[in-house]
Amino acid sequence: MRVGVLGTGMVGRTIGSRLAELGHEVRMGSRRAGNEAAVEWAASAGEAASEGSFEDAAGFGELIFNCTAGGASLEALAMAGEVNLHGKVLIDVANPLDFSGGMPPTLSISNDDSLGERIQAAFPESLVVKALNTMNCSVMVEPGRVPGEHVAFVCGENTGAKERVASLLGEFGWPAARIVDLGGIAASRGTEMYLPLWLALYGKLGTGDFNVAIERAD
Amino acid sequence: MRVGVLGTGMVGRTIGSRLAELGHEVRMGSRRAGNEAAVEWAASAGEAASEGSFEDAAGFGELIFNCTAGGASLEALAMAGEVNLHGKVLIDVANPLDFSGGMPPTLSISNDDSLGERIQAAFPESLVVKALNTMNCSVMVEPGRVPGEHVAFVCGENTGAKERVASLLGEFGWPAARIVDLGGIAASRGTEMYLPLWLALYGKLGTGDFNVAIERAD
């Protein structure tokens, strides 16, 4: 499959490399073609890896990952262009973290709204699925590095799109039973507002190699 | 130990009954002595159970549980009286859920502040420990009803107070290894902002008998 990965940070590079390793054609997009991190990534990620602008990457992909910083995601997606996102599955991995007030970050959107909802509202013809935003990128693409029955949450308005995302997560190593569908895109509020707890746990544990499992009575 | 439980809802009654069952003397407090739910609870919870005003309950307790609705907690604690909370461990179980806009609720305090912090700021001579607000009350007092290594978070400024709370949680059935100290009271932001995810999971699972475990690489 051809995948567009928007964002050249650690999350975009990690997801892009994993997709290329799995045999997908991946184009990484950034504000301008020729971004240094993207060029370096494309050179190292094999023949199926390329880079370009947000517009290039979104036009290339049959499926798009939003791995931009949450505070810049709406602008990045606007640069990608509605026409290049129309009708496509758009996996939103971003969190609207605001570091402007120092550490710990706050959320620039929260409580009665979420980044996932804002993206779906801005691009109503895209099939937005919020996923993978509740863990470190190393765990996103290689869940086996953390033991136990830990989970990946997905939410979005379109069932078929969530099934396609679940299938791709399966390629990453996520068993279907550990992909938890929380319902519509408004459930992004929950997975995004989990970030402050994630950050506290990250500080406590001193590693990003952790994730939550849901234990329940039978 | 003498314990004051503020709040006559399901959480207060469940915690109060468990404390009485464990041999503690418990006084449940509400806006006015003689509250119907509190009187009924006191009649059913044994000889060590009594009820009164917020002020009565706080004055009675060596340790205080705040089990009032989060939106009313600061007012309830003001009615309890600073003198009755001074120097005491105050376990804040409440979440600042705001149902005024319908379901799902939002948080009336969040992001750059939390109910736990507001309470500590309003009562600087109390030893506020945020705890147990990330699960159903049935699980709070009987963790064994959910299998697995699920956890209880605590946070607060005073280490000795957190140790006393951990000890009481131990009486409820929480092994020490499953009590996760997240640091100072500002970590309440994380445990309170987890509520939207908890609510989504509650809707998904159709039961409150669940909780999160933290899985990590060794």
Image: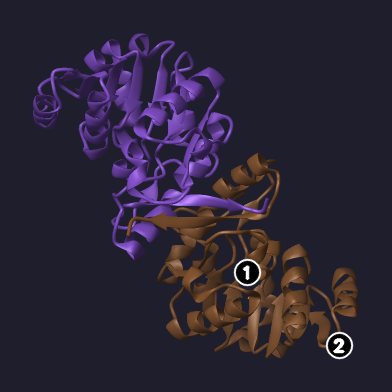
Chain colours: A brown, B purple
Residue located 8% across and 25% down the image:
B43
Nearer-N-terminus badge (1/2)? 2
The image quadrant that residue A58 belongs to is bottom right
Nearer to us in this view, B148 or A88: B148
Q: Cα distance, mark 1 to mark 2?
A: 30 Å
Question: Taking B214 as reference, is B140 above or below it?
Answer: above
Q: Is disc 2 surrounded by few (<14), some (14 to 19) or many (20+) residues within 10 Å?
A: few
Q: Amino acid under label 2?
A: Glu
Which image quadrant is residue A9 in? bottom right
* Residue B157 appears left or right of B6: right
**In the displayed structure, would residue B186 be above or below residue B197?**
above
Q: Residues within 10 Å of mark 1 (few under 14, many from 20)?
A: some
**A161 above or below A138?**
below
Residue sitting at x 49%, y 20%: B161
Can residue B33 be seen here? yes
* Chain under callout 2: A
Per the image, the residue denoted by label 1 is A74
Please give the chain letter of the residue carrying mark 1: A
Give the secondary structure at mark 2. Answer: loop
Q: Which residue is mark 2?
A: A47
Q: Position of residue B70 (x, y in %)?
A: 34, 37
Residue type of the residue flagged with mark 1 = Leu
What x and y, as percent, mark residue B7?
A: 24, 30
View extreme (top): residue:
B83
Residue nearer the viewer, B207 or B39: B207
Say which of B161 and B105 sits in front. B161
**Spot occupied by residue B42 in the image (x, y as percentages of width and height):** 13, 25
Residue A109 visible? The answer is: no
The image shows a total of numbered marks equal to 2
